[in-house]
């Protein structure tokens, strides 16, 4: 059974594991399965990795389906890399996500834990994202049922505007209707693609590093504002203006249009300067009654509705009474710090990216928040004796790191700071559990609240309240 490319037949799928993989147990061996399977399915599995105690594989044939399966609502399901759990009822998605958090904290963290709060489900399970990024490609991914070879027996070239196909960096799935974002997202994307095809505008070739149209970024806010950023490889004023004018004339409701010229080998635009073509060049979003300016390079919680819920949990866990000094680490554009500012005596936000700090300062001013200050730099370098002498020792630390979690130097810095309370907001319970285990020498976990930000995916946010032990 340890050979590669072994096919296991009629495997009963029993559970879900980390990263959204299904799980089966055969003669004491754990098999992790990809391929749209759910617990209760019976499948044939072709193994890829095959070790002594575990194996990984992909479902290649279904003998029977779980009784609780639902019909996926998206025509691109199975080919697109997103929304992989559409075949699971939403209440079951939440059960598996809650279990994922518990498993990570117990297995990786090996912590003494209080009872976990029931997971907070998303108020919207479709059309919940405020930002999507699409890619132009002259090499469309063609599903098997659409694949027709040309007269020479070759796969025909086709332009696409959509999402990258998992594990195929140069293939893009052409998207007709996406349910992740509200309209006019589909109208914008389909209008641009139709115009580009009609006028023979070149789609980017990621291998040859040539072509004109590269990316399309769309933000749609609960305020009704809509921002479009078209990323092109090089300037072509005539075609650019004609395309953007056509978009504005065809799709109503767009409040800002920008374009970004990106001649680089990668798709990141953080070191580039988007230029405003129409409107004010940014959008405004609201959390409760706070207003936030979001530019084309700003980071903001992708699910506004659940972002508000996540911040409410964070504020509740912080236990503020109006006098506390709060340090907001990885503060980004200041959204969490501003959100808790009315209950705090003072907020100090720290973030590595200077442009984000510039946004945070502006957002604080927009909301008349006068008790928050924001600083650009590395927390480990900034939080020294002189800084504490100026701003005071924190009563509460809020940390919201990226998926990789906190650097060990920062964990050690938190132990040095020794704030009475830490609220740890995480988008990756595995790295959160690792960090909590390191903090366990001084802190105990008092509250745990999973929050689902991304329905139909295995991703889950988790908020943990830590309190310093009495003997420290």
Image (cartoon, rainbow, N blue to C red):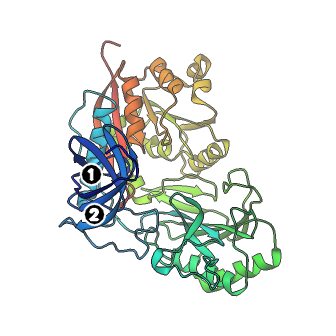
User: As rendered, which of 448 and 62 lies closer to the eye?
Assistant: 62
Residues at marks 2 and 1 touching, judged by CB atoms closer than 8 Å: yes
Q: Is residue 107 visible?
A: yes
Name the residue nearer the viewer: 119 or 139. 139
Residue 2 in the image: state x and y as whole percent: 35, 43
Report which residue position mark 1 lands on. Answer: 96
Residue pictured at 28% horizontal, 35% vertical: 447
Q: CA distance from mark 2 to mark 1?
A: 10 Å
When the figure is inspected, residue 130 is found, relative to residue 241, above or below; the finding is above
The numbered mark at residue 88 is 2
Which of the pair 179/20 is nearer the observer? 20
- Can residue 420 be spotted in the picture? no
**Disc 2 residue crowd, few under 14, some 14–19, many 20+, Cα 10 Å:** many
Callout 2 secondary element: loop
Q: Quadrant of the C terminus?
A: top left
Q: Position of residue 420 (x, y in %)?
A: 38, 23
Q: Provide residue 143's location: percent of width, then percent of height.
A: 48, 74
Q: How many marks?
A: 2
Query: Which residue is located at x 64 percent, y 55 percent?
Result: 297
Is 303 above or below relative to 447? Answer: below
The quadrant in which the N terminus is found is top left
Which quadrant of the structure image shows residue 257?
bottom right
280 vs 104, left or right, is right
First reached walking from the N terminus: tag 2 or tag 1? 2
| Apparent side of residue 242 relative to residue 111 in the rendered image (left or right) | right
């Amino acid at each position: 059974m340890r050979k590669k490319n072994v096919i296991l037949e009629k495997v009963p799928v029993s559970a879900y594991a980390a990263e959204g993989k299904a799980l089966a147990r055969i003669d004491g061996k754990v098999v992790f399965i990809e391929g749209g399977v759910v617990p209760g399915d019976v499948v044939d599995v072709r193994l890829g990795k095959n070790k002594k105690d575990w194996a990984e594989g992909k479902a290649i044939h279904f003998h029977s389906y779980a009784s609780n399966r639902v019909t996926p609502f998206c025509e691109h399901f199975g080919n697109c890399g997103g929304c992989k759990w559409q075949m699971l009822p939403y209440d079951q998605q939440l059960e598996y996500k809650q279990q994922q958090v518990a498993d990570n904290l117990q297995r990786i963290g090996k912590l003494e834990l209080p009872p976990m709060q029931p997971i907070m489900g998303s108020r919207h399970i479709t059309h919940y994202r405020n930002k999507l990024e699409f890619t132009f490609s002259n090499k469309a991914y063609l599903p098997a049922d659409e694949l027709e070879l040309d007269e020479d027996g070759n796969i025909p070239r086709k332009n696409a505007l959509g999402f990258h196909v998992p594990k195929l960096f140069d293939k893009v799935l052409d998207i007709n209707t996406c349910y992740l974002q509200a309209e006019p997202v589909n109208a914008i994307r389909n209008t641009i693609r139709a115009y580009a095809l009609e006028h023979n505008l070149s789609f980017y070739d990621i291998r040859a590093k040539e072509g004109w149209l590269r990316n399309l970024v769309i933000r749609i806010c609960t305020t009704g504002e809509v921002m479009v950023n078209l990323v092109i490889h090089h300037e072509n004023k005539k075609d650019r203006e004609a395309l953007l004018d056509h978009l504005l004339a065809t799709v109503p409701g767009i409040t800002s249009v920008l374009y970004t010229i990106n001649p680089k080998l990668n798709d990141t635009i953080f070191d580039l300067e988007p230029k405003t073509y129409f409107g004010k060049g940014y959008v405004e979003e609201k959390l409760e009654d706070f207003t936030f300016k979001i530019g084309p390079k700003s980071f903001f919680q992708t699910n506004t509705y659940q972002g508000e819920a996540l911040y409410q949990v964070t504020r509740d866990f912080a236990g503020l009474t109006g006098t506390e000094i709060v340090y907001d680490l990885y503060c980004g554009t200041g959204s969490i710090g501003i959100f808790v500012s009315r209950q705090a005596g003072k907020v100090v936000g720290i973030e590595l990216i200077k442009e984000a700090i510039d946004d945070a300062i502006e957002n604080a001013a927009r909301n008349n928040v006068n008790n928050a200050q924001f600083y650009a730099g590395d927390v480990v370098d900034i939080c020294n004796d002189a800084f504490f002498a100026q701003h005071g020792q924190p009563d509460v630390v809020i940390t919201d790191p990226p998926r990789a979690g906190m650097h060990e130097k920062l964990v050690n810095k938190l132990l040095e700071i020794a704030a009475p309370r830490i609220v740890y907001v995480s988008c990756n319970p595995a790295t959160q559990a690792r960090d909590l285990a390191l903090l366990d020498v001084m802190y105990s976990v008092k509250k745990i609240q999973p929050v689902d930000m991304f329905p139909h995916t295995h991703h889950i946010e988790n908020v943990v309240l830590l309190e310093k032990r009495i003997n420290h």
